[in-house]
Image (cartoon, rainbow, N blue to C red):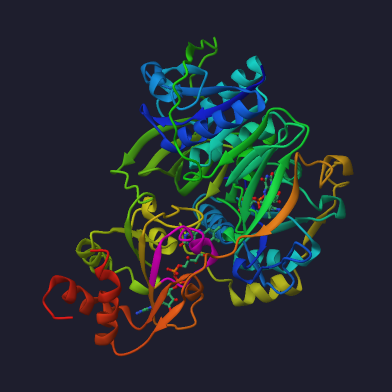
């Protein structure tokens, strides 16, 4: 049976959830089109984690276990993937469109002269078993339906959060692969890593989003969020200037929100941002410009100065003033 | 002293000015103003800073239509030493495969490179696939999402800062390498007024066609691509109430409170 592969990303043994979303989707496609679904799992001491991965749709988990694969390294990971693909000739290889997934897929595509669909938001095969996906462009306003032609393996990266993680009851085998190649990095070495606690706002129920109109006054935004029991998100420029971590940035190069409530303060509504709020429930925005493009994306646009309105709202929420 | 620092630079339409024609199912870029892809300006800025610190020559290379001429001149006005435009009708419709092939071939022709910088992604196609792809054609290491090149040592290694989930990592990478630079990681300089005048009037832009690169028409453009676009669609914003609330700050705070009350 032809194989449909999913690259499972991990760091220090911690599995990237969006890889499991892709694996679950792959299983659905595999059942429909007759592919064997194989999870490709590279890491250090990850063999005992293979169970946890496989149940999300694989019929086989191929493990490459090596201390030098503990963290992502484009040189080593692309070398291992190259060997594996040459050995087994999969029909298709899927990646989650994380930083590392995109990094790796871009290299593999040229190595195998393969077509690569970018950060797709839908995925299927056509009648000739060519991979087809929807690729958002221009910040997310326009999507192209793109198809891989001729080449094998055909490749795609999948936007995180698009597909659901599922569990399957069927059994799977775990195979440890010994590639017999040396895995010493020659050109890229990791000197150090600084990781704070990762804040995942993609599943938050309520989010207060700060844009440049807040002037980066995160204290005010955080106070409001706390009173609302909400998490905080930001537009890209605030992450760029470093007042907030990149992980809580919303938009096409950040997180897509699914919250029931989004209160957005001082964001103009650029396409690369608004693609991250399209799945929200109620959207309330505050902007001093009544014609700001964000209006299109708002249920309520409150026209006024954040610094005049929000401190008053804070007082109301604290019960210090009567509504 | 560094050898060439090459910046791959793309010109893009401003995303908010691009419209979609649902009847013809085409993207209308005609009313959109163009700009240098924002992240590529950050890449150019980083290249210019490297040059100031370690010497070398900053060369901008771009694959696109002749109208990109003025944006390459802008890059020269910002401080690039040279600019090359690869322009050929046969390149139309290129997906990332022939795009990386063409750019890599041009970079080889320029030669003598130590560092190649790209933007993290373009604001139109935005695949982010071009930098790793060029790395593979040139058989050199690639690193994506870097926010800085901290130091380059005498022995030919660079220390770079790369954004990862939850933070960043510091990597050591051997020269020559290609890196994709994060959007917004620095503040691109404004062009010097006098240099801009010179760049606009006197600078000689180099233009190469695919023949100059030894590529044939089957290898590039639509024919050389590994993907095809079978359909285009507009992603409409979701239906929203779009109610505009105005008034005095006190009043607005109260209205907001009323709207939010149900979510507390
Ligand atoms: C390839 C690419 C990818 C990108 N990815 C993303 C992404 O993922 N996420 C993202 O957010 N951006 C992204 N961007 C950037 C995006 O294009 C915009 O530049 C950005 O979203 C603008 O952020 P902003 O709305 O906070 O700031 P601005 O556009 O500066 O808007 C500030 C708004 O605040 C209002 N304002 C100012 N002061 C006040 C006040 N006192 N009270 C009330 N209102 C006030 C103003 O009227 C204005 O509307 C990307 C760009 C590119 C090119
Ligand atoms: C909506 C849409 C969807 C698409 N989907 C796919 C897809 O799924 N697969 C696919 O292979 N192609 C796809 N393409 C085509 C792809 O965008 C083009 O091949 C484009 O020429 C290069 O890719 P990019 O803009 O995505 O570059 P990116 O990889 O996002 O660009 C990163 C950096 O590479 C450099 N660079 C990129 N292009 C050039 C250039 N022409 N000249 C100089 N430097 C450059 C710049 O430094 C840039 O910042 C799509 C295009 C659109 C509009």
Frontmost residue, A88 versus A245 = A88
Q: Give the range drawn in magenta.
A: A267-284
In which quadrant is the N terminus of chain A drawn? Answer: top right
Residue at image coords 45%, 27%: A56
Answer whether residue B12 is magenta in the image. no
Q: Say left or right for A217 vs A75.
A: left
The picture places residue B151, in percent across and down from the top left corner, at 44, 44
Magenta: main secondary structure equals loop
Q: Say left or right for B162 vs A244.
A: right
Q: Say if residue B1 shows up in the picture.
A: no
Q: Say if residue B84 shows up in the picture.
A: yes
Residue at image coords 46%, 31%: A9
The picture places residue A315, in percent across and down from the top left corner, at 16, 76
Q: In this view, does B203 lie above or below B243?
A: above
Residue at image coords 59%, 57%: B40
Frontmost residue, B133 versus B25 = B25
**Which residue sits furthest left?**
A320
State the image quarter where residue B29 is shown: bottom right
């Amino acid at each position: 049976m032809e194989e449909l592969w999913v690259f499972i990303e991990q760091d220090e043994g911690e599995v990237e959830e969006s890889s499991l979303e892709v694996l679950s989707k792959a299983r659905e496609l595999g059942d429909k089109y007759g592919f064997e679904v194989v999870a490709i799992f590279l890491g250090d001491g990850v063999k005992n984690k293979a169970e946890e991965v496989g149940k999300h749709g694989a019929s086989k988990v191929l493990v490459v276990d090596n201390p030098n694969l503990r963290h992502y390294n484009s040189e080593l990971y692309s070398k291992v993937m190259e060997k594996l693909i040459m050995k087994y000739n999969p029909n298709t290889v899927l990646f989650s469109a994380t930083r590392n997934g995109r990094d790796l897929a871009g290299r593999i595509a040229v190595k195998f002269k393969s077509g690569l669909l970018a950060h797709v938001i839908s995925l299927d095969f056509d009648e000739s078993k060519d991979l087809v996906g929807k690729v958002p462009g221009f910040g997310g306003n326009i999507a192209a339906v793109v198809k891989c032609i001729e080449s094998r393996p055909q490749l795609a990266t999948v936007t995180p959060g698009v597909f659901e993680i599922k569990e399957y009851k069927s059994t799977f085998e775990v195979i440890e692969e010994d590639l017999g190649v040396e895995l010493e990095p020659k050109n890229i070495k990791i000197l150090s890593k600084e990781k704070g606690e990762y804040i995942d706002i993609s599943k938050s129920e309520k989010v207060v989003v700060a844009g440049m109109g807040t002037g980066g006054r995160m204290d005010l935004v955080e106070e409001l969020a706390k009173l609302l029991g909400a998490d905080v998100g930001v537009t890209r420029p605030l992450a760029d200037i470093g007042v907030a971590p990149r992980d809580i940035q919303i938009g096409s190069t950040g997180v897509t929100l699914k919250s029931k409530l989004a209160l957005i303060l001082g964001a103009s509504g650029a396409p690369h941002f608004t693609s991250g709020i399209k799945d929200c429930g109620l959207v309330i925005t505050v902007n001093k410009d009544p014609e700001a493009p964000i209006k299109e994306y708002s249920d309520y646009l409150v026209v006024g100065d954040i610094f005049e309105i929000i401190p008053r709202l804070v007082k109301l929420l604290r019960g210090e003033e009567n509504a | 002293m560094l050898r060439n620092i090459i910046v791959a630079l793309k010109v893009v339409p401003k995303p908010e000015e691009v419209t979609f024609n649902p009847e013809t199912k085409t993207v209308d870029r005609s009313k959109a103003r163009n700009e240098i892809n924002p992240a590529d300006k950050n890449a150019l800025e980083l290249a210019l800073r490297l040059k100031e610190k370690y010497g070398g020559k900053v060369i901008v290379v771009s694959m696109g239509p002749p109208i990109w001429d003025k944006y390459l001149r802008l890059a020269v006005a910002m401080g690039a030493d040279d600019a090359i435009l690869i322009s050929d009708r046969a390149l139309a419709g290129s997906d990332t495969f022939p795009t990386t092939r063409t750019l890599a071939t041009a970079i080889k022709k320029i030669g003598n490179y130590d560092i190649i910088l790209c933007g993290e992604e373009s604001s139109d196609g935005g695949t982010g696939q071009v930098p790793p792809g060029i790395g593979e054609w040139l058989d050199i290491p690639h690193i994506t999402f870097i926010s800085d090149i901290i130091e380059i040592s005498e022995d030919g290694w660079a220390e770079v800062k790369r954004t990862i989930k939850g933070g960043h990592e510091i990597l050591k990478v051997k020269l020559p390498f290609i890196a994709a630079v994060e959007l917004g990681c620095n503040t691109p300089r404004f062009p010097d007024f006098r240099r801009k005048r010179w760049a606009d009037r006197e600078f000689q832009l180099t233009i190469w066609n695919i023949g100059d690169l030894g590529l044939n028409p089957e290898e590039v453009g639509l024919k050389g691509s590994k993907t095809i676009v079978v359909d285009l669609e507009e992603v409409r914003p979701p239906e929203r109430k779009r109610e505009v609330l105005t008034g005095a700050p006190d009043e607005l705070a109260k209205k907001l409170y009323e709207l939010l009350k149900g979510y507390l």
